[in-house]
Amino acid sequence: SLGLTNVSFAAATAAAGRAQGNSGDIVGIKEASPREVVNSNAAPKGSKTITTSQICAHGERLGKEITRRRVAINDTQHLLTQINAHLSPKPDEAVSDTTSPSMSSLQQRLKAVQARLQKTRVLLQAKRDELQKGESRLAEEKAQRQKRRERLRRCQRGLQSVKLRLGQSVKDLPSSKTDLRAIQQALYCRRTRMLYELFQVYPIENNGRHRSIRGIPLPSIDVLNRQDLREEEKVATALGFLIHLLLLMAKYVEVPLRMVMVCASSRSFLRDPLSDPPGLEYPLFYRGLDRARFPSALRFLMENLQQFLLSRAHKIASRNNLLENTECLIHREMWGLNVNP
């Protein structure tokens, strides 16, 4: 009937509306006009009648199909979005492409800065090494300076003690000078006494024409050079006495002589320590020897006597007589007097 058809159509419309509410799309179902209703009433008897349950079932299937298509559309849109995202250039790549020249310059500057930094580090390490060496040298200099200060303190203490001793010595100087004078006087007296006793052992006598020692005449050097061989023993003995006398006098007054005198009684001789060959001997006797060396021995003996006189600030009494010079030396050493010729 017409009323049932309208009710069924209304139910189908409601189901379609519910499907539209679920899917969010508009379905093209129109409300039937009175002419369409009349035409439907005028349909033949063999037309199929649609029930409300069928309409609801069709509406539900239609809603599910709409929902499935909506999900497919959404998936398609999401897939297109991902494809477009993959195909479109990335912002980072664009930035890197647009800023690649500036990045290369920055990298070059960074390398230059790193190179300068490395050089600066090397220089800094060298400066640190120099500083360490300087500190070590400074420490050594400080240690040496400390040692010098210690030595200076010790020297100052030593100098102070020396000054104290010097002051004490200066205070004791008058008494020391008195003692020294007493010692010098005693030494002079002792030396004079020894020389006097020596002169008593070897007395020298003036006989006018010549002098003698212990009673044995000893003429001048000119006469001795022409002496006869028969007088050789006496001359050698007198010269031996003279050598012994001069040796003891040089020892008493502490006078070194140029020629070494060797006393052997009548076989005495002189030795030259500076000769070539060294130790050359000059005998004061000529029996059994070469007489040519005897004058040289007399000459060296006279030079020893002259050296003795001059070292004691005495004048030379004779250039040719040995005993005259010896007597002058003894008298001047004992009494400070000249000998009357």
Image (cartoon, rainbow, N blue to C red):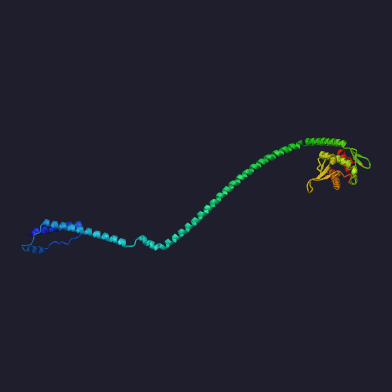
Q: Quadrant of residue 48?
A: bottom left
Identify the residue at image location x=59%, y=47%. Answer: 138
Total of numbered circles in the picture? 0
User: In this picture, is 33 found above or below 215?
Assistant: below
From the viewer's perspective, is residue 204 above or below residue 24? above
Q: Residue 3 placed where, x, y %? A: 8, 58
Q: Between residues 271 and 336, which one lies in front from this camera angle?
A: 271
Quadrant where the image shows the N terminus: bottom left
Image quadrant containing the C terminus: top right
Give the left or right position of residue 177, taking residue 82 as reference.
right
The x, y position of residue 133, in whole percent, is 56, 49
Residue 193 falls in image quadrant:
top right
Q: Position of residue 194 (x, y in %)?
A: 84, 36
Residue 329 appears in the rendering? no
Q: Residue furthest left?
A: 45
Can I make out residue 100 in this image?
Answer: yes
The foreground one among 200 and 271 is 271
Quadrant hosting residue 51: bottom left
At 19% from the left and 59% from the top, the residue drawn is 66
Q: Residue at x 9, y 58 (%)?
A: 4
Q: Position of residue 263 (x, y in %)?
A: 83, 40
Q: Residue furthest front?
A: 288
Identified at 62% across, 43% down, the residue is 147
Towards the viewer: 80 or 179? 179
The extreme right residue here reads 208
Seen in the image, is 157 located left or right of residue 6? right
